[in-house]
Amino acid sequence: MTTDTTVRPPPSGTSGSDFARLSRKIAEAGLMGRRPGYYALRITVVTGLYVGGWAAVALVGDSWWTLAVAVFLAVVFGQVALLAHDAAHRQVFRRRRASEASGRIAGAGVGMGYGWWHDKHTRHHANPNHAELDPDLDPNLLVWSQDQARAAKGLPRLIGRRQAVLFFPLLTLEGFNLHVSSVRALADRSLKHRTLDGTLLFAHFAVYLTVLLWLLPPGMAVAFLAVHQCLFGVYLGSLFAPNHKGMPILTGEDRPDFLRRQVLTSRNVRGGRFTDIALGGLNHQIEHHLFPSMPSPNLRRARTIVRAYCEELGLDYVETGLITSYRQALASLHQAGAPLRQARVPAQAPAAAVGGSDV
């Protein structure tokens, strides 16, 4: 599959008020209002599952069946991370202090540094899929474009050749990467509240490891940690992979107006209520990027308005099934790594040039 990475500019004289008109439609539909009842129920359910999962570890105890609980808790940790995401976007509470407090508590529950993640995610929302400005496109391990592939060194150069095949196996490391990146960010003096973030982060690690080693034999504790953290990483990666991977990548000064920048670089995933729960509403990625503070249960209704508006403007609105979204993301990764596969084949000198020298 070949992905067209060109983002076409808006028609002259139309871009200034396009998003304002859409915003009025959304506001008139009442979709920016808080949903306290929904979030009270969701927080209660997820908290109950979190506590119940650890209670199950204690009840099952010294048995390999405890690994089934590790699988369950991997999903629960993903749901806690989604709650932290919603809180950070002020979807749960309107006020900043309450949003930060709830986001930090949820982040601490899964071993994530809130300040580091919030800064990174804010920069992503401002410039989604921009090769120089979106931190999610940093070629730390994978390359996201052929230009990055040509400049790649070290691990990205080695992995990039087969990165489409390796993508899902590498997601098993994403949970560990979340923890390591959170710890490394504490060295950044510009990070706000880093002492608080560090305290919560190391408290999580200490309690997590103490509980495992207290309840389980050492070998079983290590197996539990591996299964839990690896599947947590796969779940996290699977939540975010369908959203932008394989969509147009912006470079340099290529920055369309806000509406087009968000719509053209995002992909929605079709599905029902189960998909909304499993992906935390991020399956409505276009609407989420346009209105990041909109409560996630309102995104499905917003989709109808946004899609019709994009059709009215002649603006591409991409929506696929979940499997198709993964297929497109993997195809894009394979295409991005093409220069590295070509570089593996050494150029052969013509026979005449080798044997016909007069030197």
Image (tube, rainbow, N blue to C red):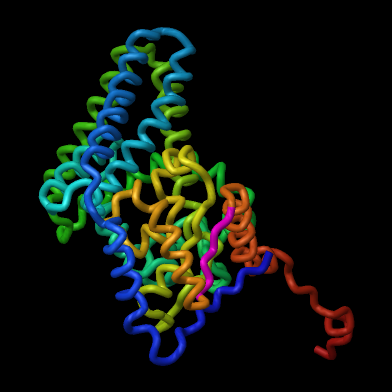
The residue located at (89%, 83%) in the rendering is 352
The residue located at (48%, 12%) in the rendering is 64
Q: How many marks?
A: 0
Tell me if residue 177 comes above or below residue 123 in the rendering: above
In the image, residue 226 lies in the stretch drawn in magenta = no
The residue located at (39%, 91%) in the rendering is 13
In the image, residue 317 lies in the stretch drawn in magenta = yes
Q: Which residues are magenta?
A: 315-320
Quarter residue 319 falls in: bottom right
Tell me if residue 192 comes above or below residue 66 in the rendering: below
Q: Where does residue 4 sit, x and y in percent of width and height? A: 60, 73
Q: Where does residue 28 sit, x and y in percent of width and height? A: 28, 63
Asked whether residue 63 is in view, the answer is yes
In the displayed structure image, the side of residue 50 where residue 359 appears, left or right: right
Asked whether residue 183 is in view, the answer is no
- The quarter of the picture where the C terminus appears is bottom right
- The quarter of the picture where the N terminus appears is bottom right
Q: Where does residue 34 sit, x and y in percent of width and height? A: 22, 49
Q: Nearer the viewer, residue 211 or 114?
A: 114
Tell me if residue 119 comes above or below residue 211 in the rendering: below
Quarter residue 224 falls in: top left
Q: Where does residue 9 sit, x and y in percent of width and height? A: 47, 84
The residue located at (45%, 84%) in the rendering is 10
In the displayed structure image, the side of residue 314 where residue 347 appears, left or right: right
Kindly report the secondary structure that dominates the magenta region of the rendered protein: loop
